[in-house]
Amino acid sequence: MQGDGVNGTVYLTREKLSSMEQELRDLKTNGRKTMAQKIAEARGHGDLSENAEYDAAKEEQQHLELRIAKIEGALSRAKIIEAKDLPNDKIYILTKVKLKDLKTQELCEYLLVSPEESDFDMHKISVTSPIGKALLGRKKGESVEIKVPVGTLKYEILDISR
């Protein structure tokens, strides 16, 4: 259920699709308008060859255009997924997972989502992250060891739900 590479499908919930479309509209209208004003203002400060403000505005414009292109690319490959359409016997994208850390005995919960929707502060982890990849296809009651940059995590899967 993951994207299949750079040009692969981007799985999104309806909510994330809507928010990305809104962000794209905002960047194309307000973002571009603001950038044009910044560049015009910097251009008015004289010699462009030694105008740091102009260079900074042009660089900011490049970042804006890259963000627009990234969102457009993701939206062009987007496929809506809904939890109700997925099986609930194993861990897939949009599965809520309750885990017990076998070293510390601490409990944690994550929702597995697409990379575009991941937000660690909201306990949403990407299916392409080391933890997400290791959990995909697993069942309730299984133990899993996950190699991460700081070592190895050991979890027991206590529950899965949609």
Image: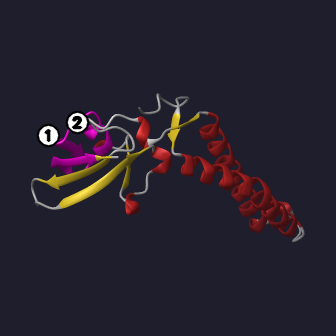
Q: Which residue is outermost to the front?
A: 84
Q: Is residue 25 visible?
A: yes
Left or right: residue 30 compared with residue 148: right
Q: Amino acid at mark 1?
A: Glu
**Secondary structure found at label 1:** loop
Left or right: residue 70 compared with residue 135: right
Whether the residues at callouts 1 and 2 have beta carbons within 8 Å, the answer is yes
Q: Which residue is mark 2?
A: 138
Q: Which residue is mark 1?
A: 142
Quarter of the N terminus within the rendering: top left
Reply yes or no: does residue 80 show up in magenta.
no
The percent position of residue 52, horizontal first and vertical second, equals 74, 66
The percent position of residue 79, horizontal first and vertical second, equals 55, 35
Magenta-highlighted residues: 131-160
Q: Amino acid at mark 2?
A: Arg
Note whether 72 is above or below 28 in the view shown: above
Left or right: residue 26 compared with residue 151: right
